[in-house]
Structure formats: C-alpha cells, structure tokens
Image (cartoon, grey):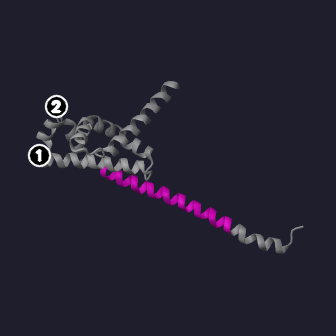
Amino acid sequence: MINWQDISSAIPALALVVAFSYYVLIIRNANRTRQAQLFMQIYGVFNTEKFMNNITEIMSWKWKDYDDFMKRYGPTTNPNAWQVFGSIAGYFEGIGILVNKRLIDISLVENLMSIHIIWFWNRIEPLSVEMRERLNAPQIDVWKEYLYNEMTKREEKRKTSKTAS
C-alpha cells in the first residue's frame, strides 16, 4: 500500500521530470522562433527591389570567358558591376553557410529561392572554377556550390517522387 511518505518522496522526482519537459518545450519553441526570425531577415533582403534588380542585371550580362568577364565587370574596370556581383554572390555564400551549419532549415531556403540559387550558380560556375585555379584558392565559392548541390538534389528527389506517383 502506498503511504504519504512514499508519495512525498516521489513529488521532487515528478517535479524534476515536469521541469525538464517544460525546459525542452521552451528550447524547441525558441529554436523555431529563431529560425523564423532568421528566415524573415533572409526574406527581407531577398524580397527587395535592389536584390531583384541586381540578380536580374547579373543574369543579363554577357561574357565569353573569365578574362572577358573581368574586363567587363571586374573590380578595376567596372567597380559598380563588381559590387552588384559581390552583393549577390556574398548573399548566397552566407545562405550556404547557414544551411550547412543547420542554422536554418534547408526547406525554407528551397521554398523561397531554389531557382535563383540554381540559375546563379549555373551562370557563375565557370568563373568560380577559373578563379579558384588562378588564385590557388579552392575555398572560393564553396558555400554557393554546396547550396547549389543541395538544391539540385532536392529538385531531383521532387521530380523522382512526382514520376513515381
């Protein structure tokens, strides 16, 4: 039979379990809130006229190869174009780091901007590869490339699941 002494000794253990459960719920909620805030900051930049104008401008540029690109849009010949290019490139590089470090859910990035990431990397990949070689800097654009690879993997899965249905 259960007596008051058994009940009173179980209360602290029960209180500890309840407190721990509450703590876990609070942490989960805080993480979701942090992700939502970070996503809104990313969306806030992505959804600006300036961002859209910059990426549209880059997508309209024409060049034959790395040297031609640098002649037309490089930092010494066209500082304004280089700044436009750098702002978009840096933005996607930062998103790649956030996704890789799991600081933002990749599905949020995918839903918002996967097509822009894919277009951008397809456009600049030859430049990045050449820059890595010429500057002996293999770390150049690794997070953009990582992000592109993740977006294309998810797109392939989505295509595969559609054809399987």
- Considering the image in quadrants, where does the N terminus appear? bottom right
Q: Nearer the viewer, residue 37 or 27?
A: 27
Q: Residue at x 48, y 28 (%)?
A: 160
Q: Residue at x 39, y 55 (%)?
A: 38
Amino acid type, mark 1 = Asn
Q: Position of residue 118 (x, y in %)?
A: 33, 36
Residue ranking furthest to the left: 77
Q: CA distance from mark 2 to mark 1?
A: 17 Å
Residue contact between numbered discs 2 and 1, judged by CB atoms under 8 Å: no
Alpha-carbon neighbours of circle 2 within 10 Å: few (<14), some, or many (≥20)?
A: few
**Mark 1 — residue?**
78
Q: Provide the secondary structure element on which disc 2 rests.
A: loop
Instruction: Name the residue furthest front.
Output: 136
**Closest to the observer, 124 or 139:** 139
- Residue 143 on image: x %, y %: 34, 45
Residue bounds of the magenta highlight: 16-45
Q: Nearer the viewer, residue 24 or 41?
A: 24
Q: Which residue is mark 2?
A: 64
Q: What type is the residue that disc 2 sits on?
A: Lys
Q: Dot 1: what SS? A: loop
Name the image quarter holding residue 12.
bottom right
Q: Main secondary structure of the magenta part?
A: helix
**Residue 30 located left or right of residue 99:** right
